[in-house]
Amino acid sequence: MKKIILTLAILYPAAALAQGAAPASPPTVGDKPLVVVGSKKSEAGKKEKPLSPAQKLQACQDIDDATKERLNCYDAIYAPQPKPKAPAAKGVADCRFLKEEDERLTCFNGFADKIPKLPR
């Protein structure tokens, strides 16, 4: 019985030390280090092109209509610059000059609805 206790007393601390030691270098196979494979998000993020303003406007169309969130989405693309007497909007960028939020939202929606569906 004393021999079993003595053996456990010697082996237990050795096993605990072996488990707690962290490897000093990265793991290798042969002489080559293991390759870390990145996630699909990081690879896709590197290959994606920045979205055009038209694609961004179409992305805003996914948000509920006539909401503040959709207007905020449009305003992120074309920052509002209200003018007291805004000219008639000839393009989507002219919508940012409208002072009233409802009018600005309607203006952006009108142009965004006319854009043909682009690939995302």
Image (tube, helix red, strand yellow):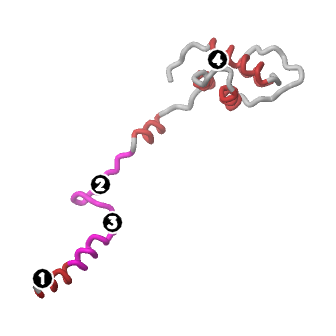
Q: Amino acid at mark 4?
A: Ala
Q: Amino acid at mark 2?
A: Leu
Q: Residue at x 61, y 23 (%)?
A: 64
Residue marked by disc 4: 112
Q: Quadrant of residue 57?
A: top right
Disc 1 versus disc 3: nearer the observer: 1
Q: Residue at x 68, y 21 (%)?
A: 66
Q: Which numbered disc covers residue 25?
A: 3
Give the distance between the C-alpha atoms of the residues marked 2 and 1, in whole angstroms: 41 Å
In the rendered image, residue 1, in percent from the top left (x then y), is placed at: 10, 85
Q: Are marks 2 and 1 in contact (CB under 8 Å)?
A: no
Give the distance between the C-alpha atoms of the residues marked 3 and 4, in whole angstroms: 55 Å
Farthest bottom residue in view: 2
Which element is circle 4 on?
A: helix
Disc 4 versus disc 1: nearer the observer: 1
Q: Are marks 4 and 1 in contact (CB under 8 Å)?
A: no
The magenta segment: 12-38
Q: Amino acid at mark 3?
A: Ser
Residue marked by disc 2: 34
Question: Counting residues from the N terminus, which is met first, the one under dot 2 or under dot 1?
Answer: 1
Question: Counting residues from the N terminus, which is met first, the one under dot 4 or under dot 1?
Answer: 1
Q: Amino acid at mark 1?
A: Ile
Give the distance between the C-alpha atoms of the residues marked 2 and 3, in whole angstroms: 11 Å
Quick check: 32 left or right of 109?
Answer: left
Question: Counting residues from the N terminus, which is met first, the one under dot 2 or under dot 3?
Answer: 3
Q: Quadrant of residue 39?
A: top left
Give the distance between the C-alpha atoms of the residues marked 1 and 3, in whole angstroms: 36 Å
